[in-house]
Amino acid sequence: MRLNIFYSGDFGRKVIENLINPDKFCVSCGDLCDHCREHRPSYANIISGLYELRTDLPDFVEEPMEYIPEHIPDCDLILAIDLNHDLLTAIPEIAEKTSAKAVIIPADDSKKVPAGLAEQVKHKLESQGVECECPKPFCALELTGKPTIDEFVNLGFGKPLLKIELDARGALFTHVQVLRDAPCGATWFVAKKLKWSDVKDYKETISSAHHSYPCTASMEKDAQLGDTILHEAGYIIRKSVEEAMEKGL
C-alpha cells in the first residue's frame, strides 16, 4: 500500500506519529516503560507523500489546487485530515491526479469537516470510482468491504480491537493486547492503564485514560450523533473493551 497524507493541525500529527511509531510517541508508562510498542511495526515505509497544508487562507479560496503541492506521487490511499473546507473540495482532483483507489476523511470535528461537505466530497469520489469513508470519529472505522480501505484497517488502525485476559477470579486484568489501534494511538494508552487494574472499575479506568491521552475529538455536540464526538469515541473504546472481556471470560 502507498499512502499520501494531507493534514492540518495536531490530530493529523498524532495519526502520522502513530503510523510511524517513533520511540517517544507513547508516554503512558513514564519511567516504568517496558517498550511494548517496539514490537509493533512502523509503517513509515508505506507513506509516499506527507503534506501539512496551510490554515492561514482567505475566507474563500477560488482555486484550491493553487494551495496543493504541484508534484504529488501516485498512491493507493489518501488520508485527508482536518483540512480547510475549500482545500477539502480539492481531494477528488488530487485522487484523480495520483490514481488513488481510496480516500479516508476522518470527521473528528464537525466544524472542520461539516457533514454536508463530507457527503459532497464522498459522492464526487465515488462517482470517479474511488472508495471513500468519512468515519466519525476516525476510531469508528471498521471493515467496509472496500478493498483498499479494508487493507488500511487490517494494518491495525480503526475501531479498537483487543484481546483481554482476567485472573482466575475475574477480578483483575492480567493481559490487554491491542490487535487494532485507534488511528490516534489512544488504544495502547488505555490498554496499559487497564493492565493490573480492577475489573469492577473498568469504566472509570477507561474514561480516565481516554481523557488523559488525550482524545482530540471535538467536545461540541454533533447534530448527527446527538452527542459530542469525544463522547462517541469514549463509547467506542468502552464497547471494544467489553467485547474483549466477554471473550476473555
Image (cartoon, rainbow, N blue to C red):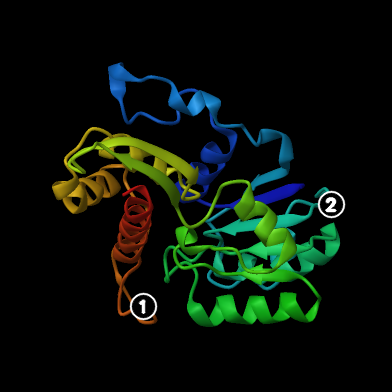
Mark 2 belongs to which amino acid?
A: Asp
Residue 53, given in percent of the width and then of the height, sits at 61, 52
Q: Can I make out residue 53 in this image?
A: no
Q: Nearer the viewer, residue 145 or 23?
A: 145
Q: Residue at x 36, y 78 (%)?
A: 225
Q: Nearer the viewer, residue 118 or 59?
A: 118
| For residue 95, side relative to residue 58 (left or right) | right
Residue 217, given in percent of the width and then of the height, sits at 37, 58
Q: Residue at x 48, y 66 (%)?
A: 107
Q: Residues within 10 Å of mark 2 (few under 14, many from 20)?
A: some
| Pointer 1 residue | 225
Quarter of the image for residue 35 reads: top left
Give residue 96's mark: none
What kind of element bears circle 1? loop
| For residue 90, side relative to residue 25 (left or right) | right
Mark 1 belongs to which amino acid?
A: Leu
| Pointer 2 residue | 74
Q: Earlier in the sequence, mark 1 or mark 2?
A: 2
Q: Residue at x 34, y 52 (%)?
A: 241
- Above or below, 17 against 205 in this view is above
Q: CA distance from mark 1 to mark 2?
A: 35 Å
